[in-house]
């Protein structure tokens, strides 16, 4: 009948300690001592042998580290302590061939055990299946290397005593048929992992030689292809194991004696994300006699990361290559010791499967390891340091770590974007066969992420920090700009002209037109960098299939040409001002701003004459700078085309400035035509030919003024004499965005022309200033009168009387001034001379609607040995209209009093300067002629 007893087999002499149970056995007889004899009569007879724990997982620490703990010894100093965890029991289920006899004694059970063969267990194993836990939390079954279960337990049945010493009983497992050429001492066993769940158990709370990450990989690999064991012995004091597992992505070597590890080595293959270089992570734990532990034999570990693929070549042309514009990428340091690994799991979002210990970031005591990287470019190497992730090469049903898109997305979240500073180096971001000026940029930093490519992980530049030499040179702006490759470029490559996107940048020459050619002050936004056009606004670029840019979308109102809004002047625009920098080996880049052949159209007072164009070229290099701006074939109808007063026509207007020289303005083919109310001075305008004159240039931070002056010869015809007639013209080019203005003058206030006919004479001048907003200033003056001189030898004298009028229009306000100058002088025998000059002015001011007058009398007396002069000034007096209730009001001039005219009486009251000295002198002079009265008169 079937019999299934449970035995505890104990033999103290050689430390036999086994748990035994059996099935499929029948009692055939009993020995004289009453012990039954069991026999295997069926083909499923089984003997299950349970061994005590076969392994101790001991705490390990890195070399040169202090002991993990110190505890009191009971007396004396503290002692170093390493912790340990005991494994569970191990069991082997043996199949007993039919006819096998088993006597339930120690000798009988050991005798029957030697005849059994291990039975293939279930996966995971049941309570009656073979389950060897050696090492800690690794559950193996045992088989021969041919995949069968022809394995025998070689062990002594009786205690082995030599010279009074009894050896420890051990069950040595070995294959029945070793492979050819195998040494005799080689057990030729295979260890197949049969319980992945147990292998993935958490570590005991301290570092052990075979951690959870390594056990997980070992269980995965040894499940399909067993590891090889050259020695496997089980005993009451622990197991002895010599095993090696060599798989494509993982290696395991283990030496343990009597349950204690001697040497454990694991090698995990993987790649470094995001660069994709292959690498291995090695953990080596060895038992050494440690002086710091009192020469105790403790486990010390070393953790090493080795880069096995130093150089990685770029993939074929495509988005991955464009996203990381370098050639070969090399990690220049290949071996890193003292690496700390904090493995991270991955929960697959699609399958819901959890994958243990998939990746970690290599760290050292001071933080993440920065791997030195060399990237090749056509212009030299770029070097930087970059933290990386080590991703284990895991291959499981439905999941391959290095090709799984979901894991790549997870790594991107964990790794993020790592910023790397660079020393401002020129980088060719396109690497095209024909390099464009906009392909190379001055890069001061890159932000690196990762992506999955058909050739594995590949880095990608998610952002670059660049400085734009063009802006630094042209506008003095040297801020770092973050740029990114456009999606179109990554998709299409060099066929796409717009290379980089960036945060919108304001490019404005308003207020500093001296940097952009004086005549023009461009202002536009830029949010991208083009390979051929430099800084561009993607919104303002032509739509697909179109060729022209809408100026209204490109330029704001303050962008001007000659003071006119650019958006109203340019037409058929194909590109914005092209701003690029061209790298020069060993020198700063050459910066260019070009905008040529820009067609201009009519806008207000600006009138094209033929093919009116704008050409702008700015070049700045290490050797100097050149600026040239030219506007051709245009006319200015001032102040408005509907009511013109002046037509100023230019064949060309050119601004040039070479470094080390003064700015220059050249005017070509100028014609001046006075129209409307100014036709009376057309004959004077006909005398102006600016193209034959060389202007005087005055340059200030505010702008540039070109002054032309043409002196006309005196005209004499009998008693008629005209002299001091000059034509003055100024062209003012502000640098602050104000409009260009033109001034014309025939003579000037300081130097009026003179006209004489016998004793009658006079003079005057005419000045006007216009820009596209209208007539800004007009001033004209005419003087007339007579002079008479007599000479009686002993006495001579001169008397004159002149009157004149001056008209002034400025800022919309009109001032008309009339004046009278009367005077004379007499000289007697050259000893006495007396001269008197009286000047009276009366001006109408439209702003205050008042007449403002002033009288000045100057008397000079020279008596040879004594001379003096007296100046009498009435001060400013104002004549205004008012009602009966009008009250006196104070002038803004603190030295002047004003009294309003009484409307009922129409009186004008003088307001004299209220200064002590002037008032006293005035009263002294007044008293010499009229008596002082009281009342209203002053």
Image (tube, rainbow, N blue to C red):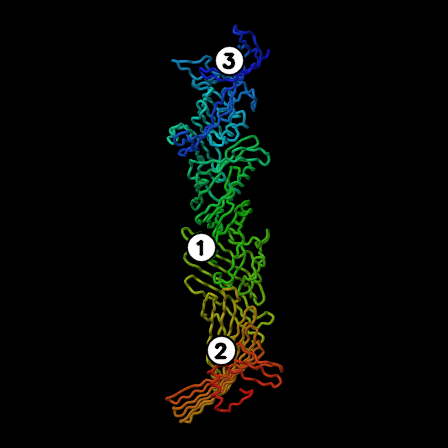
Tell me how many marks there are.
Answer: 3
2 or 3: tag closer to the N-terminus = 3
Rounded to the nearest angstrom, the CA distance separating label 2 from label 3 is 137 Å
Q: Residue at x 55, y 87 (%)?
A: 937
Residue 113 drawn above or below residue 88: above
Q: Nearer the viewer, residue 879 or 62?
A: 62
Q: Is residue 750 left or right of residue 543?
A: left
Between tags 2 and 3, which lies in front? Answer: 3
Question: Residue extending furthest front?
Answer: 75
The label on residue 487 is none
Residue on which disc 1 sits = 590
Crowd rating for badge 1 (residues with CA inside 10 Å; few <14, some 14–19, many 20+)? many
Residue denoted by label 2: 749
Name the spot of residue 754 as percent of width and height, x first.
48, 82
Mark sitting earlier along the chain (1/2)? 1
Please state, as top left, top right, bottom left or bottom right, where the N terminus lies in the image. Answer: top right
Q: Are marks 3 and 1 in contact (CB under 8 Å)?
A: no
State the residue in front, 611 or 889.
Answer: 889
State which mark lies toward you, 1 or 2: 2
Q: Is residue 843 above or below residue 197?
A: below
The percent position of residue 487, horizontal first and vertical second, equals 55, 46
* Sequence-first tag of 3 and 1: 3
Question: Are the residues tagged 1 and 2 within 8 Å (C-beta)?
Answer: no
Question: Is disc 2 in contact with disc 3, using a CB cutoff of under 8 Å?
Answer: no
| Marks 1 and 2, how far apart at CA | 49 Å
Question: Residue 760, can we see it?
Answer: no
Instruction: Kindly state the secondary structure of the residue where label 1 is placed.
Output: strand
Q: Position of residue 372 (x, y in %)?
A: 43, 41
Circle 3 sits on which residue? 109
């Amino acid at each position: 009948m079937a019999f299934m007893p449970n035995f505890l087999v104990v033999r103290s002499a050689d430390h036999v300690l086994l748990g035994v149970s059996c099935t499929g056995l029948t009692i055939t007889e009993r020995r004289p001592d009453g012990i039954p004899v069991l026999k295997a009569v069926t083909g499923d007879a089984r003997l299950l042998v349970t061994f005590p724990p076969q392994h101790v997982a001991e705490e390990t620490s890195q070399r040169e580290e202090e002991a993990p703990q110190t505890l009191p010894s009971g007396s004396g100093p503290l002692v170093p302590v390493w912790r340990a965890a005991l494994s569970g029991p191990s069991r082997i289920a043996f199949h007993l061939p039919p006819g096998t006899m088993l006597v339930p004694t120690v000798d009988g059970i050991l005798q029957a055990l030697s005849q059994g063969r291990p039975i293939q267990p279930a996966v995971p194993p049941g309570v009656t299946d073979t389950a060897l836990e050696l090492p800690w939390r690794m559950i193996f079954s045992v088989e021969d290397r041919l995949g069968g279960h022809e394995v025998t337990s070689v062990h002594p049945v009786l205690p082995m005593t030599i010279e009074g010493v009894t050896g420890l009983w051990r069950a040595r497992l070995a294959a029945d048929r070793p492979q050819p050429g195998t040494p005799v001492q080689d057990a030729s066993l295979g260890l197949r992992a049969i319980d992945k769940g147990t292998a993935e158990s958490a570590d005991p709370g301290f570092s052990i030689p075979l951690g959870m990450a390594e056990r997980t990989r070992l269980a995965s690999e040894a499940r399909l292809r067993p590891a090889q064991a050259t020695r496997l012995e089980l005993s009451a004091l622990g197991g002895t194991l010599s095993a090696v597992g060599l798989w494509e992505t993982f290696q395991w070597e283990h030496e343990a004696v009597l349950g204690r590890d001697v040497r454990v080595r694991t090698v995990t293959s993987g790649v470094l994300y995001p660069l994709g270089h292959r690498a291995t992570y090695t953990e080596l734990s060895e038992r050494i006699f440690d002086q710091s532990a009192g020469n105790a034999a403790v486990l010390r570990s070393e953790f090493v990361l080795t880069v096995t693929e130093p150089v990685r070549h770029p993939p074929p042309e495509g988005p991955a290559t464009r996203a990381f514009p370098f050639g070969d990428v090399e990690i220049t340091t290949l071996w890193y010791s003292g690496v700390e690994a904090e493995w991270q799991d991955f929960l697959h979002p699609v399958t819901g499967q959890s994958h243990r210990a998939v990746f970690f970031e290599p760290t050292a005591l001071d933080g993440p390891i920065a791997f030195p990287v060399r990237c090749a470019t056509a212009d030299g190497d770029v070097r930087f340091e970059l933290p990386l992730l080590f991703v284990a090469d895991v291959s499981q049903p439905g999941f391959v770590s290095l090709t799984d898109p979901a894991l790549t997305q997870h790594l991107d979240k964990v790794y993020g974007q790592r910023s790397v500073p660079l020393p401002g180096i020129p980088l060719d971001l396109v690497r095209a066969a024909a390099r464009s000026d906009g392909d190379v940029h001055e890069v001061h930093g890159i932000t690196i992420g990762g992506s999955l490519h058909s050739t594995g992980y590949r880095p990608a530049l998610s952002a670059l920090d660049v400085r734009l030499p063009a802006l630094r040179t042209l506008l003095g702006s040297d801020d770092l700009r973050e740029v990114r490759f456009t999606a179109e470029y990554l998709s299409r490559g060099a066929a796409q002209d717009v290379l980089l996107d960036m945060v919108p940048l304001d490019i404005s020459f308003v207020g500093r037109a001296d940097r952009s050619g004086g005549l023009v002050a461009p202002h536009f936004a830029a949010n991208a960098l083009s390979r051929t056009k430099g800084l561009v606004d993607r919104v303002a670029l032509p739509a697909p299939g179109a060729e022209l840019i809408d100026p209204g979308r490109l330029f704001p109102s303050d962008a001007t040409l000659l003071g006119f809004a650019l958006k109203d002047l340019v037409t058929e625009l194909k590109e914005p001002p092209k701003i690029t920098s061209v790298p020069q080996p060993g020198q700063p880049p050459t910066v260019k701003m070009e905008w040529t052949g820009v067609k201009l159209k009519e806008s207000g007072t600006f009138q094209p004459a033929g093919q009116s164009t704008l050409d702008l070229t700015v070049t700045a290099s290490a050797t100097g700078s050149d600026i040239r701006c030219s506007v051709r074939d245009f006319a200015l109808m001032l102040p408005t085309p509907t009511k013109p007063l002046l037509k100023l026509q230019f064949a060309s207007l050119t601004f040039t400035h070479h470094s080390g020289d003064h700015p220059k303005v050249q005017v070509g083919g100028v014609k001046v035509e006075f129209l409307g109310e100014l036709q009376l001075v057309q004959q004077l305008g006909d005398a102006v030919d600016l193209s034959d004159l060389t202007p005087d240039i005055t340059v200030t931070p505010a702008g540039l003024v070109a002054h032309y002056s043409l002196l006309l010869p005196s005209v004499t015809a009998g008693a008629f004499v005209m002299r001091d007639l000059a034509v003055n013209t100024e062209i003012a080019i502000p640098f602050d965005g104000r409009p260009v203005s033109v001034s014309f003058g025939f003579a000037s206030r300081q130097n009026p022309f003179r006209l004489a006919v016998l004793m009658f004479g006079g003079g005057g001048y005419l000045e006007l200033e216009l820009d596209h907003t209208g007539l800004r200033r007009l001033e004209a003056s005419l003087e007339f009168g007579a002079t008479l001189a007599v000479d009686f030898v002993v006495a001579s004298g001169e008397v004159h009387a002149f009157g004149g009028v001056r008209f002034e229009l400025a800022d919309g306000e009109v001032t008309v001034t009339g004046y009278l100058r009367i005077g004379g002088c007499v000289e007697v025998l050259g000893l006495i001379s007396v001269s008197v000059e009286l000047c009276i002015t009366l001006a109408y001011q439209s702003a205050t609607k008042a007449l403002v007058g002033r009288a000045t009398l100057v008397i000079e007396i020279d008596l040879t040995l004594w001379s003096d002069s007296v100046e009498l000034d009435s001060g400013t007096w104002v004549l205004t209209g008012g009602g009966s209730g009008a009250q006196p009001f104070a002038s803004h001039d603190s030295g002047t009093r004003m009294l309003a005219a009484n409307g009922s009486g129409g009186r004008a009251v003088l307001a004299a300067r209220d200064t002590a000295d002037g008032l006293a002198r005035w009263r002294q002079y007044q008293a010499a002629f009229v008596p002082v009265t009281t009342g209203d008169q002053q």
